[in-house]
Image (cartoon, helix red, strand yellow):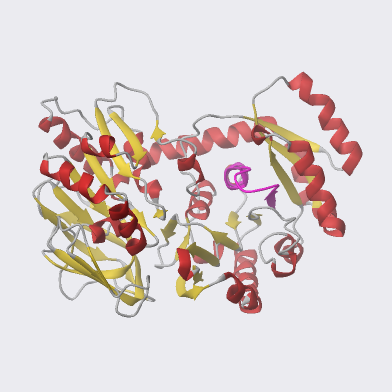
Amino acid sequence: MIQGTGSGAGKSLIAAAFCRIFADEGVKVAPFKAQNMALNSFITAEGGEIGRAQALQAEAARVMPAVDMNPILLKASGEMGSQVIIHGRAFRYMKAQEYYTFKKEAWKAVTTSYEKLAKAYDLIIMEGAGSPAEINLMDVDIVNMSAAKMAKAPVLLVGDIDKGGVFASLFGTVKLLGRDSRHIKGFIINKFRGDMEILRPGLQMIQDRTGKPVIGVLPYVHDLGLPEEDGMALSQGSRCRGQGSRELKIVIVRLKYISNFTDFDPLAQEPDVELVYSTNPVEIENADMVIIPGTKNTVKDLLLLKKQNLDQSIGRAFAKGIDVMGMCGGYQMLGNRILDPYHAESTHAEVEGLGLLNIETVFEKEKITCQVEAEMIKAISDQPLKGYEIHMGRSSGDIGLFRIKRLFSGSSPVTHNSSPLFDGSANKNCWGTYLHGIFDNNEFRRDLINRIREKKGLPVLPVSVDYTGMKERALDNLAAMVKENIDMEFVRRILTL
């Protein structure tokens, strides 16, 4: 099990690296995170919703993502608390105290999923959450030491040296854990970019004080080329940098409850695109394309946009002929009205949208979660597409941008649609869709960018980025870096205890 001294220590990617290392050695390996709190989610082949990090770890393990790899997913939704997703299905919204009283039921889901994985795989790489030493939460823990003890898993504790105070955080975690610290077998120091000779005495000192060795020091890597788990990365800087001339500027409106922002990672890899997360009106009104992303609280983010007068900036961008696109919650915002009769997502029964698309959305009680195949009916691209849906809302009106085939819907597989299904809407230079993951499609992404290039009088460019292949190479590079800098013989020894 990989635990961390705090959020952002690097647990998710180190777990992914171990998944790839052992998979490449022929071990049947799977990831497992008992409980994840994240707004970036992924839809599995069976139509279940799990954390994006566990989907990436499954890719690293060269296995299909499955709901048992993340049995509990919490999606924070502001004053409504968090949406609790169990075994891939939305259960209900809960405030913190309500969820803590729900611990026994949540723990049943955790143990059931773990037992299924344990029967199917030779090795499970578990991941903790936040810090295992939150002393006010230890009695309700189902993801850190409770999960480690349930699985009899040796623990490696990761500390982020880039934040400062790494030795204090490692030592403090061990001391606060008390007897439970016996499960920690070693430390990993992550994101190091200093002089190793200066650090080396500290490695021996922390072992002397805790009795636990530092089994590896991982270097700071600026851009691993892999999706981030949550929005912490966005708060550290608004721009996604890369190589190339950056002739085009795509601005993603930085929403408070932004979700699935990894949808746009493929755009950042294109050599001619500068991708910016911003709430600056000047940047929005002078972009080559503006995207309103998904959100876990569509109504609240829409009201915040209006409070900041960003609705006017988006309207002015549209009036200037700048392409405006909305994905999922952003798509709903672009319509005329959002209705929430059951208060499924907000306390507002009705909110006026931005009015750029001739649609209106009603929030229903049931969430649609499914993988889809799609084809675009109107302009931009005629390439076949793959993506997935995650939404409570149902939109009606001028719908018909995509013809879609839902591979799974709700709890029952739907392999053949009895009648054609349609998604998305367009109005001049504005369009929107519920389909996540469409920018992972290389030809579609390049067709979209080339359309913007033509509007600027720039020559079109061929497809030059294979995003899936790029992720695979990045996972290989991550695994190689971890393997080179960690005592893998130590890891193998603790796995045989």
Look at the image and tell me whether residue 328 can be seen: no
Residue at 33% in and 62% down: 298
Q: Where residue 343 sits in the image (x, y, percent)?
A: 36, 76
Residue drawn at (26%, 39%) of the image: 284
Front residue of 365 and 128: 365
Q: Which residues are magenta?
A: 1-22
Front-most of residues 85 and 351: 351
Q: Judge whether residue 6 is colored magenta.
A: yes
- Residue 45 seen in the current view: yes
Determine which quarter of the picture holds residue 397. Answer: bottom left
Quick check: 332 above or below 195?
below
Q: What residue is rendered at 11% in x and 32% in y? A: 455
**Residue 356 placed where, x, y %?**
15, 55
Please tell me in which quadrant of the rendered image residue 448 appears: top left
Count of numbered labels shown in the rendering: 0
Any magenta on residue 401?
no
Seen in the picture, residue 171 relative to 96 is either above or below; the reply is above
Q: Is residue 96 left or right of residue 360?
A: right
User: Residue 444 at what x, y percent from top left?
Assistant: 22, 43
x and y, in percent, of residue 45 in the image:
40, 63
Q: Is residue 305 left or right of residue 99?
A: left
